DNA sequence: AAAACTACTGAACAGTGTTTAGTAAATAAC
DNA sequence: GTTATTTACTAAACACTGTTCAGTAGTTTT
């Protein structure tokens, strides 16, 4: 019975179409203006159709923010060629912050906005493990390698990973949500951020 | 002419009433449910009245988030009695994070939400300098004192201040926006945060 | 050919921030 | 003291939002 298979394929493609256009509108116009009606217009279907494929707006944007994590993970993968684990950790910070700078709306959705987290199930099964964990595990692995090879000070892995993530996320989110805009214009944020990361690397260096 | 003065006093009190009730509803119900209509009902006036005292919702909540900065500043003031500047810096971090933990909605408004920042004027005059700067300057002063007395490593003041702020804000905002909820339940966040701060203090110690 | 199912939509609901025309009361002018 | 003006306020509307549901073509099954 090939009909059922075709229908499932069509259903899958429709979901993909909605997802793509939702991402498009979102990237172009931001979360607030990425209304169900605006997305519906873009896919040339009625708004109600979207609800046949996604439970609500939160679930739709959970799927959109997953796309962001896939992309960030891919960008992190390019670091595999760097031999020195300390330099790899350093570059990881820069890639993270570059991602935030180049994709502010997506970063917002991934790490700041409440929308996708609202769609998180209370008790996820093994195979629907949170997509952000893949990136976090990458960070943990690099830190562990640095400790194993005596490149950075020995310390609790979780404490170190959370500290580093908090630091770069703090930088990114303060910037994205305009909390650094109150500082004098002549302050070169780019340079400040670079210095901050180098400084942190220096501090934790063994 | 006492009438004009009375009118201005009444106007000022009305503004204060709106502000108080707006803060009440906001603390109790969060930003989204703190609608203009809900606030209007609380003050027993029509919604349109609020617009005679505040340009829009952003400006109203800019005023609300100022209240938060006054309170945080007050809490920071209690540290003046601590002689050791390094311990004062350490306690500053704890107070900051305790404030975030005890007033999550207010912290959100002060440091994460876009609403109040939208109301920021492009070119503020001297006397309407941003309220958050008072707290930031407090941080800078403590750091400077620590460097002067050789308690922490010499470094660029701005780089160090931004790094420390980013770190604690990263912790607070990841927590408030649910990004630490994906970690296993057995992970003791409170302890993790304490260790993270102590760890940072250890790193920057001279 | 009739029945069942599928994919989709128009229209409505309840809510939002905001604007405007209009009103009643307080004040100012004569 | 009466009229004119200004002030403080509001009802109602506008243009949105996410979401639901009855209804309807079109496809598939019987």
Image: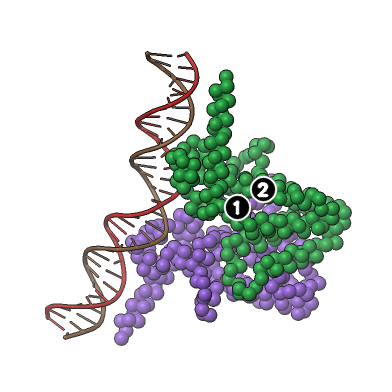
Chain colours: A green, B purple, C brown, D red
Task: Give the number of the disc on residue B55.
Answer: none
Question: Can I make out residue B92 in this image?
Answer: no
> Relative to residue A143, is residue B12 drawn left or right?
left
Q: Secondary structure at mark 1?
A: helix
Q: Report the front residue among A100 and A41.
A: A41
Q: Report the front residue among A41 and B150.
A: A41
Determine which quarter of the picture holds residue B138.
bottom right
Which residue position is annotated with label 2?
A71
At a point 74% along the width and 67% down the height, the residue shown is A195
Residue A201 at what x, y percent from top left? Answer: 78, 62
The answer to which of marks 1 and 2 sits earlier in the sequence is 2
Quadrant, the N terminus of chain A:
top right
At a point 58% along the width and 46% down the height, the residue shown is A64
Residue B141 at what x, y percent from top left? Answer: 67, 77
On screen, D13 above or below B166? above
Which residue position is annotated with label 1?
A106
Separation of marks 1 and 2 at Cα, in angstroms? 10 Å
CB within 8 Å, label 1 to label 2: yes
Residue A111 at what x, y percent from top left? Answer: 62, 53
At a point 57% along the width and 34% down the height, the residue shown is A12
Badge 2 crowding class, 10 Å Cα cut-off, few under 14, some 14 to 19, many 20 or more, is few
């Amino acid at each position: 019975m090939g009909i059922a298979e075709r229908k499932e394929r069509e259903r899958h493609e429709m979901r993909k179409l909605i997802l793509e256009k939702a991402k498009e509108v979102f990237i172009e116009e931001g979360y607030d203006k990425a209304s169900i009606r605006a997305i519906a217009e873009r896919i040339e279907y009625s708004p109600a159709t979207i609800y046949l494929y996604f439970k609500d707006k939160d679930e739709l944007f959970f799927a959109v923010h997953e796309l962001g994590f896939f992309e960030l993970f891919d960008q992190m993968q390019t670091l595999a060629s760097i031999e020195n684990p300390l330099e790899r950790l350093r570059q990881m910070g820069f890639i993270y912050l570059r991602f935030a700078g180049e994709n502010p709306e997506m970063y917002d959705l991934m790490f700041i906005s409440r929308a996708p987290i609202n769609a998180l199930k209370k008790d996820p099964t093994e195979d629907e493990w949170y997509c952000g964990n893949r990136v976090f595990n990458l960070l943990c692995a690099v830190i562990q390698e640095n400790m194993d090879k005596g490149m950075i000070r020995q310390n609790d892995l979780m404490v170190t990973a959370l500290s580093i993530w908090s630091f770069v996320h703090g930088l990114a989110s303060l910037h994205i949500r305009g909390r650094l805009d109150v500082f004098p214009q002549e302050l070169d944020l780019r340079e400040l951020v670079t210095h901050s990361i180098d400084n942190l690397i220096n501090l934790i260096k063994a």
